[in-house]
Image: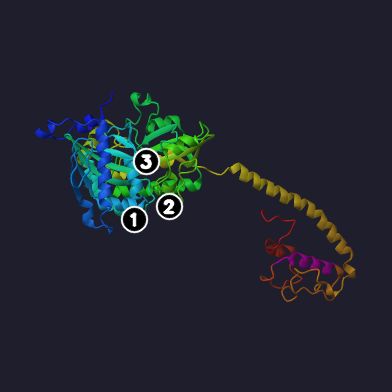
């Protein structure tokens, strides 16, 4: 049986003698204190005027004590006394505004109904809570992670300004709750996998192979989260159309370079797969759990479509913002996001990698220097997990064959017609006069200035030869005239100009 959030989060925290006399809060009381504290912080922030975010705003920490009986500044409540710390409130307010989150909607999502507790398949001791409307995840973080996130905020601010469409976690708030001798630090993030959509497969992928297989305990769950080696055993890759594949990989590349610049490693891609051919989505259950998308760019499809400006919310359709994909003959919806980015390549991680590299192949372990980790992560995603569909070459070659066949058939039809026409023309050649060149029935003939062929004082056979030459050159473009041809030129010399003509006897592809 797993330990309760309160007992788990209490491990490793320092408590004073006075705090030990207080009764530890129950998990329900702890969740209630978190909701009340966030509600108070956001409500108190609404009284402060809007202004530009300054550099010093990222390091601000506001602290307030909320006794159960209430005070002049705080409301009364039925939870144990607790202290609330709010990190960088103005910066996070800017982040929420950037993603279109209104304060009233934010408070309604977090504080209106009890939080839903989620299991944690990872190796960390973090606990996850989901808001009832499926919008936000509340995750507990370690002190070092909270400290690292606060140091990360200026660069995170700059990156979001340049690119709000990202698969990186979207942070909306960082808080610390001290209640009954227990210190809990929580971060508010976007929800990657909507609960209203049944995930037939879930994966936590890093691109490494060392111990990257779900445990027996995890596999026994009703909805297990598998890992890299499990994916390779169960799937041959998820196939996207070329445009979607390109947009997805460009987004991943950009996000990984941002993480590399912050010296971040050991992150994962959380991947959810919904098979459309299985158990169609019930519209009633979806509407009950997701009343409408509040957050811009929060769906997987929006996050990778960087060339679309100000899209309409897509949460009301049956896809919930999933990315269409194929696996063999199955149609899929893909939900994904990069998670666990608060691991920097600090001294402890360097030592961990060095130790593991002595026992195992250093390139297969998850802990690695940020640049190598990013390259390996992208290679695994772009070649093993995600694949680009290719047009059917058989169909295009078949079309080409049909086209060639049609042309050859037309040549066979036209050739006898031309032969009969030339025979008839030869029989009536004696009746032609000098007006042949100016006939209105021959609009594509070259003028006499372009091709000078005269027949004065020659025999009838030479006259017919010159007529054949005129017929051959009659289809040359008027803007590219040939030099005058003398009667002494042979047929082999005339062949030099034949490729410029369009003759039914000689197909253009030969």
Of callouts 1 and 2, which one flags the residue occurring earlier in the amino acid sequence? 1
Compared across the picture, whether 242 is left or right of 458 comes to left
Q: How many marks?
A: 3
Callout 1 secondary element: helix
Which image quarter holds the N terminus?
Answer: top left
In the foreground, 137 or 486: 137
Secondary structure mostly seen in the magenta stretch: helix
Q: Residue 384: x percent and y percent?
A: 43, 38
Q: CA distance from mark 3 to mark 2?
A: 20 Å
Query: Are discs 3 and 2 less than 8 Å apart at CB?
Result: no
Q: Which residues are magenta?
A: 461-476
Q: CA distance from mark 1 to mark 2?
A: 13 Å
In the image, is residue 467 part of the stretch drawn in magenta? Answer: yes
Q: Is residue 245 visible?
A: yes
Q: CA distance from mark 3 to mark 1?
A: 21 Å
Q: Which mark is residue 306?
A: 2
Label 3 packing within 10 angstroms: few (<14), some (14-19), many (20+)? many
Q: Is residue 384 visible?
A: no
Q: Residue furthest left?
A: 17
Q: Which residue is mark 1?
A: 161
In the image, is residue 442 part of the stretch drawn in magenta? Answer: no
In the foreground, 267 or 370: 267
């Amino acid at each position: 049986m797993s330990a309760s959030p309160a007992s788990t989060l209490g491990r490793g925290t320092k408590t004073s003698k006075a705090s030990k006399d207080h009764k530890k809060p129950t998990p329900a009381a702890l969740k209630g204190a978190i909701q009340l504290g966030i509600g108070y912080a956001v409500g108190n922030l609404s009284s402060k005027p809007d202004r530009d975010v300054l550099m010093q705003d990222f390091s601000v920490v506001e602290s307030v004590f909320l006794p159960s009986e209430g005070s002049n500044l705080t409301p009364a409540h039925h939870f144990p006394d607790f202290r609330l710390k709010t990190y960088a409130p103005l910066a996070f307010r800017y982040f929420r505004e950037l993603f279109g989150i209104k304060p009233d909607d934010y408070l309604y999502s977090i504080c209106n109904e009890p939080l839903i507790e989620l299991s944690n398949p990872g190796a960390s001791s973090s606990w996850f809570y989901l808001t009832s409307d499926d919008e936000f995840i509340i995750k507990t973080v370690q002190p070092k992670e909270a400290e690292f996130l606060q140091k990360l905020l200026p660069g995170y601010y700059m990156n979001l300004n340049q690119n709000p469409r990202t698969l990186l976690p979207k942070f909306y708030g960082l808080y610390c709750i001290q209640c009954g001798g227990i210190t809990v630090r929580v971060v508010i993030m976007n929800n990657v996998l909507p609960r209203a959509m049944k995930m037939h497969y879930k994966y936590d992928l890093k691109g490494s192979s060392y111990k990257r297989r779900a445990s027996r305990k995890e596999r026994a769950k009703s909805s297990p989260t598998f890992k890299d080696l499990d994916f390779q055993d169960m799937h041959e890759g998820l196939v996207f159309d070329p445009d979607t594949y390109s947009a997805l990989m460009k987004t991943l590349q950009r996000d990984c370079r941002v993480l590399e610049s912050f010296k971040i490693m050991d992150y994962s891609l959380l991947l959810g797969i919904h098979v459309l051919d299985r158990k169609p989505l019930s519209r009633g259950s979806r509407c009950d759990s997701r009343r409408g998308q509040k957050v811009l760019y929060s769906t997987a499809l929006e996050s990778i479509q960087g060339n679309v400006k100000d899209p309409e919310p897509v949460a009301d359709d049956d896809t919930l913002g999933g990315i269409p994909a194929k696996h063999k003959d199955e149609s899929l919806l893909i939900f994904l996001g990069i998670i666990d980015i608060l691991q920097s390549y600090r001294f402890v991680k360097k030592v961990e990698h060095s130790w593991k590299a002595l026992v195992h192949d250093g390139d297969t372990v998850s802990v690695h220097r940020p640049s190598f980790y990013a390259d390996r992560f992208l290679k695994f995603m772009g070649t093993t997990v995600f694949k680009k569909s290719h047009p059917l070459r058989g169909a295009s070659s078949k079309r080409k064959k049909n086209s060639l066949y049609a042309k050859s058939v037309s040549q066979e039809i036209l050739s006898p017609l031309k032969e009969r026409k030339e025979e008839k023309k030869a029989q009536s050649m004696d009746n032609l006069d000098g007006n042949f060149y100016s006939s209105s029935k021959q609009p594509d003939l070259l003028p006499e200035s372009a091709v000078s062929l005269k027949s004065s004082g020659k025999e009838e056979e030479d006259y017919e030869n010159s007529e054949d030459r005129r017929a051959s050159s009659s289809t040359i473009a008027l803007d590219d005239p040939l030099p005058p041809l003398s009667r002494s030129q042979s047929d082999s010399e005339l062949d030099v100009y034949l490729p410029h003509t369009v003759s039914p006897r000689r197909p253009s592809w030969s």
